[in-house]
Image (tube, rainbow, N blue to C red):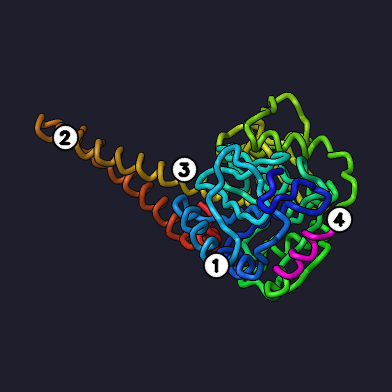
């Protein structure tokens, strides 16, 4: 790991990974404002935002505190006292002494996602890692935090009572054993202390965590007949329609398809809901187009004096219009389902 302050040793916890979604921008801005200029650790940030938000977030964090911040680039070295932010539509991943910026499969409906960042740090930096879960919705980060703990890293979670969107902290606490749970105001001083502390020897990295990190980095694919993670699920991947395996991590249920897309149970429900909506819109469009074609055929039959043809195509037009209206009403009843996801900054 490259050292910004002339130190090349890695006997301390010198890799801090931070994740959040809704409310996460404000939270991480406040957090980095309190970090010291001589922080002996690199800081990597993945916040769910729109495709154009990461560059702005890097600028915000660069101006917020004493540590320089920039959008991460492929192969960029890890530097102590420097903040790297996930690029738009790319996963930010951690190597031994550098970062990767890869367009791997979406996880929990988003890219960048928190879980791939945390897992890659756990695999490649083990006990060097301090992982922080901030305000956000749903449960991205829970699986990654478990990976950090299993590989000897430390887990820090914002107190859910202090978070404007407590889902991510709540779920992290439910599925991973946190070392520290505290309000946002106390996290920066804590990180400064933890980063300066010695790290224990690294444990053996579990093979399943290593495999998932390689999938996010686009360095490994899993064939449909290789059930590496768990039993096959009857549910199809909403992104690619591939077969999925069900993964159980304690009380956390996840799914991963053979092309790499991954979902927690809650994220899968939302993704299936979006797929259902796309299907309904396609069906309504088809019904409307069929109605237009039948009206045109009825008009052609009228010009040719074909009375039975006029009646038949007029009947079909009504049927298709009624079908389109039924689908429209179904879509109207589904309005608002995606509002919470939109607030979370998910696509």
Circle 4 residues within 10 Å: few <14, some 14–19, many ≥20: some
Q: In the rendered structure, which segment of residues is drawn in magenta?
A: 188-198
Q: What is the distance, in whole Å, between disc 1 and disc 2 at their CAs? A: 76 Å
Q: Which mark is residue 307?
A: 2
Residue 194 highlighted magenta (yes or no): yes
Tell me if 158 is positioned left or right of 343 in this view: right
What residue is at 68 percent from the left and 44 percent from the top?
2
Mark 2 is surrounded, within 10 Å at the Cα level, by few (under 14), some (14 to 19) or many (20 or more) other residues, namely few
Q: Main secondary structure of the magenta part?
A: helix
Q: Where does the image place residue 148, in percent across and percent down from the top left?
A: 79, 50
The residue shown at (89%, 43%) is 203
Sequence order check, earlier mark of 4 and 1: 1
Residue 123 visible in the displayed image: yes
In this picture, residue 187 sits left or right of residue 341: right
Q: Which labelled disc corresponds to residue 138? A: none
Under tag 2, what secondary structure? helix
Task: State the residue position of label 3.
Answer: 279
Kindly indicate whether the residue at mark 2 contacts the one at mark 1 (C-beta within 8 angstroms): no
Q: Earlier in the sequence, mark 4 or mark 2?
A: 4
Question: Does dot 3 land on a helix, a strand or a loop?
Answer: helix
Q: Position of residue 260 (x, y in %)?
A: 64, 35
Give the camera-side residue of 342 and 169: 169
Give the numbered dot on residue 198: 4
Disc 4 to disc 2: CB gap under 8 Å: no
Which residue bears the numbered disc 1? 64
Which comes before the other along the chain, label 1 or label 2? 1
| 3 vs 4, front mark | 4
């Amino acid at each position: 790991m490259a050292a910004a302050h002339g130190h090349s040793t890695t006997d301390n916890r010198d890799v801090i990974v931070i994740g959040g979604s809704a409310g996460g921008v404000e939270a991480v801005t406040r957090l980095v404002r309190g970090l010291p200029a001589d922080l002996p650790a690199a800081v990597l940030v993945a916040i769910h935002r729109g495709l154009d938000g990461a560059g702005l977030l890097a600028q915000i964090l660069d101006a917020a505190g004493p540590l320089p911040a920039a959008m991460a680039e492929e192969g960029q070295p890890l530097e102590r006292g420097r903040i790297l932010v996930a690029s738009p539509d790319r996963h930010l991943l951690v190597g031994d002494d550098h970062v990767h910026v890869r367009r791997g499969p979406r996880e929990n409906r988003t890219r960048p996602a928190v879980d791939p960042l945390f897992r890659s740090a756990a695999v490649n930096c083990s006990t060097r890692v301090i992982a922080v879960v901030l305000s956000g919705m749903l449960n991205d980060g829970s699986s990654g935090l478990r990976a950090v703990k299993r590989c000897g890293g430390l887990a820090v979670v914002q107190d859910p009572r202090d978070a404007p969107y407590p889902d991510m902290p709540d779920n992290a606490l439910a599925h991973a054993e946190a070392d520290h749970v505290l309000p946002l105001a106390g996290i920066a001083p804590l990180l400064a202390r933890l980063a300066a502390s010695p790290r224990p020897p690294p444990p053996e990295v579990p093979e399943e965590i290593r495999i998932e990190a390689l999938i996010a980095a686009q360095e490994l694919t899993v064939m449909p007949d290789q059930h590496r993670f768990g039993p096959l699920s009857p549910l199809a991947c909403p992104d690619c329609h591939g077969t999925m395996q069900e993964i159980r991590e304690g009380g956390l249920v996840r799914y991963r398809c053979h092309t790499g897309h991954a979902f927690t149970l809650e994220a899968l429900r939302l993704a299936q809901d979006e797929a259902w909506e796309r299907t309904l819109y396609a069906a309504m469009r088809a019904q409307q187009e069929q109605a237009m074609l039948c009206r045109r055929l009825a008009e052609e039959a009228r010009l040719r004096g074909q009375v039975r043809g006029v009646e038949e195509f007029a009947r079909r037009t009504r049927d298709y219009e009624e079908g389109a209206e039924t689908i429209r009403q179904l879509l109207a009843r589904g309005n608002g389902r995606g509002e919470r996801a939109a607030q979370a900054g998910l696509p």
